[in-house]
Image (cartoon, coloured by chain):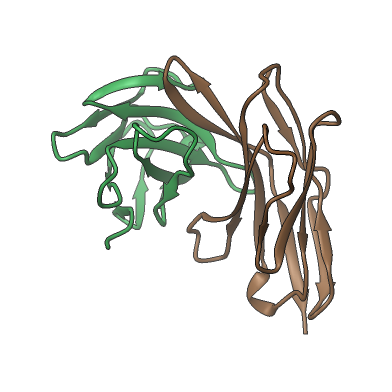
Chain colours: A brown, B green
Amino acid sequence: AQTVTQSQPEMSVQEAETVTLSCTYDTSESNYYLFWYKQPPSRQMILVIRQEAYKQQNATENRFSVNFQKAAKSFSLKISDSQLGDTAMYFCAFMLTQGGSEKLVFGKGTKLTVNP
Amino acid sequence: DAGVTQSPTHLIKTRGQQVTLRCSPKSGHDTVSWYQQALGQGPQFIFQYYEEEERQRGNFPDRFSGHQFPNYSSELNVNALLLGDSALYLCASSLRTISNQPQHFGDGTRLSIL
């Protein structure tokens, strides 16, 4: 079964500090893609960062970076210099391809609050 | 460059009724996927459409059906509504010829069943 587990339902961090959100996944595929999406109260799901499983180098997008451990099936998100606008639900997702069609499998999310 | 647009924003229905939700994909995209997000949960895949056909389906009953039009826009229909159908319904679009690209999401339709 293809599953994504986010073990931290809620987290909080002080503005300007660093926080790490955890994600583990289960798949039998060898090549796949992983994503972190952010969903603020406005509801729109916004892509934060993505990682291609065949790349050993961890992806980085400005203040956001991942720690991808393929053998451990772990994909954590690190947010540096946290800002108030980072307050949102964060979802880890795995892209599953079946018969030429792709779908995202999401975890249950982590609610992140950045405090002033 | 228009992003993914969904309508309506919010809808209230009663049990047993039928509902139609609409989605226009991001400009240049030809594939539309629908997700259901219950309160406090991550989105669950309903189905995906491209070339006007359903290509993959998640674990949802036949009460959930869809359609894709020649202009790539899509509709999600739900019949015989149940209280458990109350959720945020998200539409996502992508370009089929480029695999493993991020799906772009709309703001969703909040469906409330009374």
Question: Which is nearer the eye, A102 or B114?
Answer: A102
Residue at image location 44% in from the left, 14% down from the top: A99
Q: Is residue A3 left or right of residue A74?
A: left
Question: Which is nearer the eye, A52 or B46?
Answer: A52
Question: Which is nearer the eye, A69 or B79?
Answer: A69
Compared to residue B64, the image places residue A16 above or below, namely: below
Q: In this rendering, does residue B114 appear at all? A: no
Q: How many marks?
A: 0
Q: Is residue A8 left or right of residue B91?
A: right
Q: Residue furthest bottom?
A: A116
Please identify the quadrant where the N terminus of chain B is shown: bottom left
Residue at image location 35% in from the left, 32% down from the top: B96
Dividing the picture into quadrants, the one containing residue A54 is top right
Dividing the picture into quadrants, the one containing residue B31 is top left
Residue at image location 67% in from the left, 54% down from the top: A90
Q: Is residue B77 left or right of residue A110?
A: left
Please identify the quadrant where the C terminus of chain B is shown: top left
